[in-house]
Image (cartoon, helix red, strand yellow):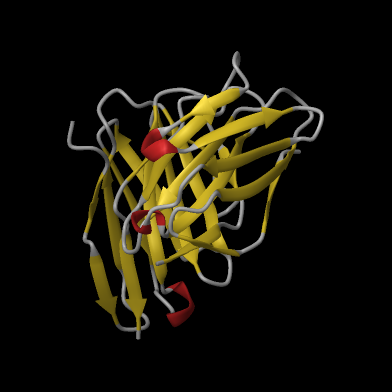
Amino acid sequence: AQSVTQLGSHVSVSEGALVLLRCNYSSSVPPYLFWYVQYPNQGLQLLLKYTTGATLVKGINGFEAEFKKSETSFHLTKPSAHMSDAAEYFCAVSVSGNTGKLIFGQGTTLQVKP
Amino acid sequence: DAGVIQSPRHEVTEMGQEVTLRCKPISGHDYLFWYRQTMMRGLELLIYFNNNVPIDDSGMPEDRFSAKMPNASFSTLKIQPSEPRDSAVYFCASSYRQGAGYTFGSGTRLTVV
């Protein structure tokens, strides 16, 4: 069965600093992996996804993530944090089989300090 | 495209009343998902449909919850009777295939008093 673990429920960085949000997954089959962002009082928005091919995936707002099969990880990074990046971030893995169903992690709240 | 449309955005109701949440998925998306989000439990999948057919409703908390998808452009989630512990944000999402990811609606914030 697939599962997702996000390490750290809260991460705080200074504006301009590197952002690193950690995600580890468990899957018995090659996974599809996703990062979503949720701003206050809004729905979740797709940041980026990995399905097949290149393991370094670039998304919106300058974020990227690297799929590392050997480490079962899909960490989200951004070289320089902006105040507008403050939000909650969710990692998700697809369930095996052609179901379209995603399993979400518990989320990581990113705080950006001026 | 208008995206996934949910209504109402906010709902306040008294315990014991019936509540109906509505969702219009993106045209052409074959999958529709209902999630509930709370501080304590995070995002929980309640039920999902494929081509209007319920596929997995194992996340529906109890018989008080029911969901329907009478056609490809409309779904409802009903709670009857509602209880204070049902207070949460309910999200609808749609997808056109595995690997495409979801498009979420803006959610319905339900408060049961």
Q: Quadrant of the N terminus of chain A?
A: top right
**Residue B61 location, quadrant:** bottom right
Q: Quadrant location of residue B113? A: bottom left
| Quadrant of the image containing the C terminus of chain A | bottom left
Q: Nearer the viewer, residue B30 or A8?
A: A8
Q: Say which residue appears at 31% left-offset and 83% top-offset.
A: B14
Q: Is residue B80 above or below residue A44?
A: below
Is A93 rendered above or below residue A111? above
Instruction: Tell me residue A5's x, y (percent).
Output: 70, 51
Q: What residue is at 47 percent from the left and 44 percent from the top?
A: A36
Q: Position of residue B82 (x, y in %)?
A: 39, 74
| B26 left or right of A110 in image | left
* Vertical comparison of A49 with B58: above or below: above
Which of these two is toward me, B58 or B103? B103
Q: Is residue B60 visible?
A: no
Q: Is residue A38 above or below residue B53?
A: below
